[in-house]
Amino acid sequence: MNLEDAVGQLNADYFFREFTFSSNTFKPSPNAELELADKVVWLDDLLILSQVKERNAPPNSTAEKERIWFEDEILGKATRQIRDTMSYLKKYPKIEVSNNRGHVFDIATAHSTHPHKLVIYDPHRLLPTDCAFKKYHRSKTVGVIHLIHSAAYFGILQTLMTPVEVAEYLSFREGLAETWGDALSAVSEKAVVGHYLRNLPEEKPDIKFAKYVDEVEQKDKNWDISRIIHLFHERQTTPDSPREIGYKVLQELARLYRTEMGEFKTRFDFSMKKALADEPCLPHRFSTKRCGFVFIPLRRNDLPHRHNALVNFTALNKYDQKLDRCIGLTVIAEENGSWCDVQWCPVEFPWKEDPELQTALVERYPFRPVRTRKIERYGLQDLSE
């Protein structure tokens, strides 16, 4: 597998197939074909454009030849392809490409206010250190373009793991470039990731931050819901559910931070256990700044009323928590009691007063009480310096 295919597979695994695009030629007119950056990740207002370069050096290569390759292929051609992609997104009203599930989307409708721009490359071992450590290229037209060694890119994804954390890291990394300039290129990528984990942008990049990567990687990963996301389409049974509804659910799941994923997984697993045991259970829920979730375990004799329960509990929770977005899910065990079926209901519209829902909540409040608490995402604040 070459580097471009490897990056495409890695992006599909970490950013999910629904939101990654690897075959990116498009036709602005019947007689013309253009090409976007090699890899595109698009999730609502999150947009990551990556150009991939792999060095196949001749046996007699030298450090000077590798420097020339870096300047020509990385700083020259690769960054130009990123600039071209940015110009296409602004110029053409329709750019239809297929994601890694084979679904066609118009990527020209991407609403990202600040796309992340990367060149991911695999150099020869003779590449001079000053080139290999260079963290960014500043373009006059599109601003900072990240330069990331392929091994470092794989390490970033293995440490951060969720789409929003990777995007947040790239924003943090760009901020360091703007504030500290060449000091960013004096430290390893691992130290930059640790700097982000510690969240101290006002401090100068330093090798001391690398230890925080090891601390995070030693923590458990009980928050991981990637299996739920990867199996979503195969197991989706919500009646009369168009593709767009499924994408709305996946979009909200993919935008969760790891601690939020942990809260989701805890309630999802608990609902499964209650449904499999066919035990009565009140709905339980949690909300992020962006979206609310309500989990509704049902008994098997509730099956005829399942759809009404899903719609009503989702609406009530959205109203009760004053949310603009809410996702409800019912969990019910099949007849043999060996597995559960899950149906989903995403709702999105601005919150407003609703006397009917208010009355329903007053007369028969159907939820467990909620409490607000702050959850530290990485738990690094108290680590000794």
Image (spheres, rainbow, N blue to C red):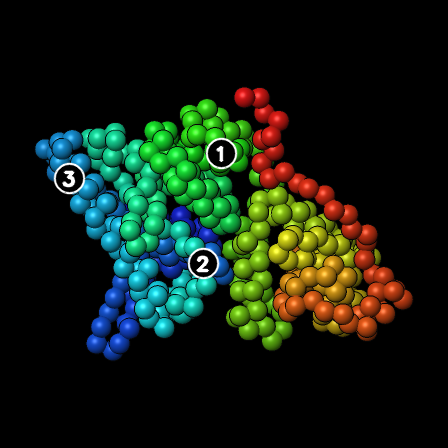
> What residue is drawn where x is 39% and y is 35%?
180
For marks 3 and 1, give the CA distance.
Answer: 35 Å
Query: What amino acid does circle 1 point to?
Result: Glu
Residue holding disc 1: 202
Residue 234 seen in the figure: no
Q: Helix, strand or loop at disc 2?
A: loop
> Residue at the spot x=27%, y=63% of the render?
35
Q: Nearer the viewer, residue 201 or 73?
A: 201
Q: Above or below — where is 149 with respect to 294?
A: above
SS of the residue at dot 1? loop
Residue drawn 25% across and 66% down?
34
Q: Earlier along the polypeptide chain: callout 2 or callout 3?
A: 3
Please, what is the three-letter code of the amino acid marked with disc 2?
Thr
102, 259: nearer the viewer: 259
Residue 113, given in percent of the width and then of the height, sits at: 45, 58
> Which amino acid, mark 3?
Ile
Instruction: Point out the frontmost of discs 3 and 1.
Output: 1
Residue 385, placed above or below residue 291: above
Front-lying residue, 115 or 228: 115
Q: Is residue 14 left or right of residue 379?
A: left
Which mark, by number, is residue 229? Answer: none
At a point 35% along the width and 66% down the height, the residue shown is 90
Q: Residues within 10 Å of mark 2 (few under 14, many from 20)?
A: few
Q: Nearer the viewer, mark 2 or mark 1?
A: 1
Dot 2 or dot 1: first in sequence order is 2
Q: Earlier in the sequence, mark 3 or mark 1?
A: 3
Q: Which residue is mark 2?
A: 113
Horizontal and vertical percent position of residue 182: 33, 33
> How far separated are the C-alphas under marks 2 and 1?
24 Å
Crowding at dot 3, Cα within 10 Å, few <14 / some 14-19 / many 20+, comes out as some
Q: Which residue is mark 3?
A: 68
